[in-house]
Image (spheres, rainbow, N blue to C red):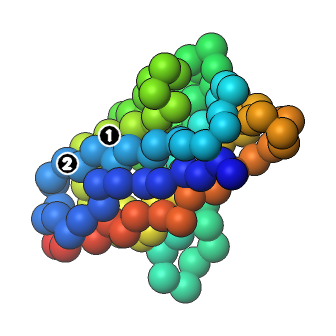
């Protein structure tokens, strides 16, 4: 079974940086698109950043120029660099991937999230 696990969430002060990672495991053949989402308490989950198999990236307006998404194809890993963090960036960050796996074909997988808390 394919799994995604996020790492790197913690409590930081405004202005600081974090790097989140998402590691895929299981019978993965290749990963197409990575997505990073976040959900603040009481809010809906929102898209933060995406990166395609070709390396094209897209960001939510609120994080553009502060966050950077990258990927390591050989390790089935994606990273989200969070710079100049603000209290409104607080939330649980989830990764998701559209991928091909042995036995399941093309499908979407979600991680369980990692918590980022930014204090003012």
The x and y percentages for residue 108 are 75, 47
Crowd band around label 2 with a 10 angstrom C-alpha radius: few (<14), some (14–19), many (20+) = some
Total label count?
2
Instruction: Give the left or right position of residue 103, taking residue 37 as reference.
Output: right
**What residue do we see at 53% from left, 65% from top?**
112
Instruction: Give the left or right position of residue 64, taking residue 10 as reference.
Output: right
The x and y percentages for residue 67 are 37, 40
**What residue do we see at 67% from left, 25% from top?**
30
Q: Quadrant of the C terminus?
A: bottom left
Q: Where is 87 relative to 107, above or below?
A: below
**Tag 1 and tag 2, C-beta contact below 8 Å:** yes
Instruction: Give the left or right position of residue 11, taking residue 3 as reference.
Output: left
The x and y percentages for residue 117 are 28, 71
Q: Quadrant of residue 79?
A: top left
Closer to the camera, 38 or 1?
Answer: 1
Could you tell me if residue 37 is visible in this image? no
Q: Where is 74 relative to 27, above or below?
A: above
Closer to the camera, 78 or 40?
Answer: 78
Q: CA distance from mark 1 to mark 2?
A: 7 Å
Could you tell me which secondary element the residue under label 2 belongs to?
Answer: loop
- Which of the two discs, 1 and 2, labels the residue nearer the N terminus? 2
The x and y percentages for residue 19 are 28, 44
Q: Quadrant of residue 98?
A: top right
Residue topped by disc 2: 17
Q: Which mark is residue 81?
A: 1
Q: Quadrant of residue 91?
A: bottom left
**What residue do we see at 59% from left, 20% from top?**
56
């Amino acid at each position: 079974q394919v799994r995604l696990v996020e790492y790197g969430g913690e409590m930081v002060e405004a202005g600081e940086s974090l790097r989140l990672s998402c590691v895929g495991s299981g019978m993965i053949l290749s990963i197409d698109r990575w997505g990073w989402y976040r959900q603040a308490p009481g809010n809906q989950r929102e898209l933060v950043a995406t990166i395609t198999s070709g390396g094209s990236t897209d960001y939510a307006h609120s994080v553009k120029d502060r966050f950077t998404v990258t990927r390591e194809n050989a390790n089935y890993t994606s990273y989200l660099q969070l710079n100049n963090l603000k209290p409104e960036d607080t939330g649980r960050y989830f990764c998701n991937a559209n991928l091909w796996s042995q036995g399941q074909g093309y499908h979407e997988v979600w991680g369980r999230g990692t918590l980022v808390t930014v204090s003012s």
